[in-house]
């Protein structure tokens, strides 16, 4: 394959559903001229209630698909998948750069260390070794961790009534109690305004911008940035749900439920 064809290959991005659109939005700011294949694995959602081994097997199949599509880099836009499978995937597929999101707890350490902090995440993320190592390394000892059971599913469905009910039940107790909120699932930024209505004015942190910056650095350092200026975004849903596609592109344009 000649160099020009190599650099103009697509970038693969995947999530358990459409939540990774929040990551893609940040990537597009940094890399507006690339081709993207976004894989929404709604057939296997939620990842959060699956074992680490199950998640690794699921993610391996997605990576294999991206490699078949000749992707030059892969982005894991799902905190649960990153927490449970990134090291496994990087060892198994060492020839392709794999960039992974993680809860932006280090950003709290760097920017707002002394403030009370709430981390919202899935069970799969919270129970992972990767997350707990991150927590130990940057712990400000003023941090609450909340496993938001079912929240990503309700966001995926767009069920506003259930989203508000779940938020009230799960995080209502933190109203006026925290100043920082780490959004440890890529679905959660889609309801950032609703979270703030429940717990009051807070500073939000998520890992999307860091992923975008890292991806750009990797492509630049490996001379893999596209030389063409014809951005293209292809959406694929594993359950072949046309509504997912419509909502994905809506969020790409608008950003919130």
Image: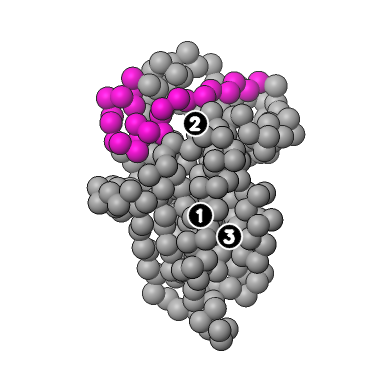
Q: Nearer the viewer, mark 1 or mark 2?
A: 1
- State left or right for residue 246 relative to residue 125: left
Where the N terminus falls, by quadrant? bottom right
Instruction: Say whether marks 2 and 3 touch (CB < 8 Å).
Output: no
| Colouring scheme applied when the structure was drawn | one colour
Residue 52, above or below 123: below
Q: Which residues are magenta?
A: 142-165
Q: Nearer the viewer, mark 1 or mark 3?
A: 1
- State left or right for residue 120 relative to residue 169: right
Residue 161: x and y in percent read 27, 25
Label 1 vs 2, first from the N-terminus: 2
Residue 103 shows in the view: no
Q: Which mark is residue 215?
A: 3
Residue 247: x and y in percent read 28, 47
Label 1 vs 3, first from the N-terminus: 1
Q: Which mark is residue 49?
A: 2
Label 1 sits on a secondary structure element that is helix
Label 2 vs 3, first from the N-terminus: 2
The Cα–Cα distance between marks 1 and 2, rounded to whole angstroms, is 19 Å
Residue 81, above or below 199: below
**Quick one: 186 or 153, which is closer to the camera?**
153
Where the C terminus falls, by quadrant? top left
Residue 23, above or below 185: below
Residue 104: x and y in percent read 59, 39
| Residue depicted at x 28% and y 31% | 159
Task: Give the residue number, with chain letter if any, for mark 1.
Answer: 61
**Quick one: 113 or 150, which is closer to the camera?**
150
Q: Residue furthest right?
A: 137
């Amino acid at each position: 394959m000649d160099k020009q064809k190599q650099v103009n290959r697509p970038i693969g991005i995947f999530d358990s559903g459409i939540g990774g659109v929040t990551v893609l939005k940040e990537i597009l700011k940094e890399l507006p001229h690339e081709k993207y294949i976004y894989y929404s694995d709604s057939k296997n959602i939620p990842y959060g209630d699956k074992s680490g081994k199950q998640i690794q097997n699921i993610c391996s199949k997605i990576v294999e698909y991206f490699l078949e599509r000749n992707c030059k880099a892969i982005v894991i836009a799902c905190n649960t998948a990153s927490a449970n499978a990134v090291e496994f995937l990087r060892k198994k597929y060492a020839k392709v750069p794999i960039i992974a999101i993680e809860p932006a707890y280090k950003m709290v350490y760097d920017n707002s260390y002394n403030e009370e902090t709430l981390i919202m995440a899935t069970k799969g993320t919270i129970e992972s070794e990767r997350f707990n190592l991150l927590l130990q390394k940057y712990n400000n000892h003023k941090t609450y961790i909340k496993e938001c059971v079912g929240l990503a599913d309700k966001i995926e469905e767009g069920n506003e009534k259930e989203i508000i009910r779940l938020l009230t039940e799960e995080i209502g107790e933190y109203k006026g109690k925290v100043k920082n909120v780490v959004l440890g699932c890529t679905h959660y930024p889609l309801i950032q305004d609703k979270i703030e209505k429940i717990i009051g004015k807070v500073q939000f942190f998520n890992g999307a911008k860091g992923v975008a910056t890292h991806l750009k650095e990797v492509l630049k350092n490996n001379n893999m940035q596209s030389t063409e200026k014809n951005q293209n975004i292809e959406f694929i849903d594993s359950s072949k749900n046309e509504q997912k596609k419509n909502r994905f592109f809506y969020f790409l344009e608008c950003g919130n439920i």
